[in-house]
Image: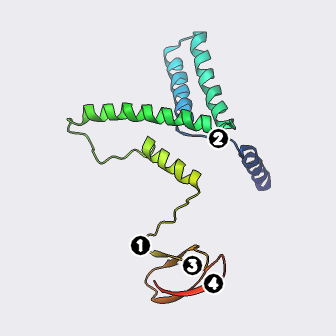
């Protein structure tokens, strides 16, 4: 049974290669369609226009996920995030005078964060940031970044790419 699910997962991964996948706009559209279906069950509205709208949202969301036109889907998501940012800023400004406002709250789906991450991924500059437990050195031969544990004194580092060894203080 486990092998079946592994094959199924691998098949899905192969199918999704080169496709856009899920993003903030797709998740919002799916959430909106579920909310609309729940409201329809509560208020017992039997209008075919309502059902058509729900199904159109679901179909459009899946269309976006399986699309191979990545640039166009990215631009759609960017416009959505810009609009969302404007709306959220309007609400923040309206609430800023209230006593329950948290000014340090950050929005991980904000346009600025999304745009920066997208351009970092497009440029191929995958950044390796250091943390408190590690230090990062560059190989003098091939310029490969190597992460080593801090606080070990002088250590001999072997580059995983070219095999060059060099001594640094960690």
Q: Can residue 72 be seen at all in this image of the molecule?
A: yes
Res. 143 image quadrant: bottom right
Answer whether residue 110 is visible to the viewer in this image. no
> Dot 4 corresponds to which residue?
164
- Mark 1 crowd level (few <14, some 14–19, many ≥20, 10 Å Cα): few
Separation of residues labelled 1 and 4 (CA atoms): 26 Å
The label nearer to you, 2 versus 3, is 3
Between discs 1 and 3, the one toward the N terminus: 1
* Tag 4 and tag 3, C-beta contact below 8 Å: yes
Crowdedness near tag 4: few (<14), some (14–19) or many (≥20) residues, C-alpha within 10 Å? few
Which quadrant of the view contains residue 156?
A: bottom right
User: As displayed, is residue 90 above or below residue 18?
Assistant: above
In the rendering, which numbered label is found on residue 139? 3
Q: What whole-number distance in Å separates the C-alpha atoms at marks 1 and 2?
A: 35 Å
Label 2 to label 3: alpha-carbon separation = 36 Å
- In the rendered image, which residue does mark 2 sit on? 20
């Amino acid at each position: 049974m486990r092998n079946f699910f592994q094959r199924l997962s691998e098949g899905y991964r192969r199918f999704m290669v080169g496709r856009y996948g899920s993003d903030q706009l797709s998740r919002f559209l799916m959430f909106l369609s579920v909310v609309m279906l729940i409201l329809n069950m509560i208020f017992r509205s039997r209008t075919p226009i309502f059902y058509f709208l729900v199904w159109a949202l679901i179909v459009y969301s899946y269309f976006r996920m399986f699309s191979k036109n990545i640039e166009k889907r990215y631009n759609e998501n960017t416009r959505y995030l810009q609009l969302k940012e404007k709306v959220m800023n309007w609400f923040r400004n309206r609430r800023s005078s209230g006593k329950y406002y948290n000014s340090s709250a950050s929005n991980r789906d904000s346009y600025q964060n999304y745009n920066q991450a997208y351009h970092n991924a497009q440029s191929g500059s995958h950044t390796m940031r250091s943390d408190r437990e590690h230090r990062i050195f560059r190989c003098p031969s091939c310029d490969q970044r190597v992460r080593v544990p801090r606080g070990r004194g002088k250590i001999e580092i072997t580059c995983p790419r070219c095999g060059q060894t060099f001594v640094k203080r960690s």
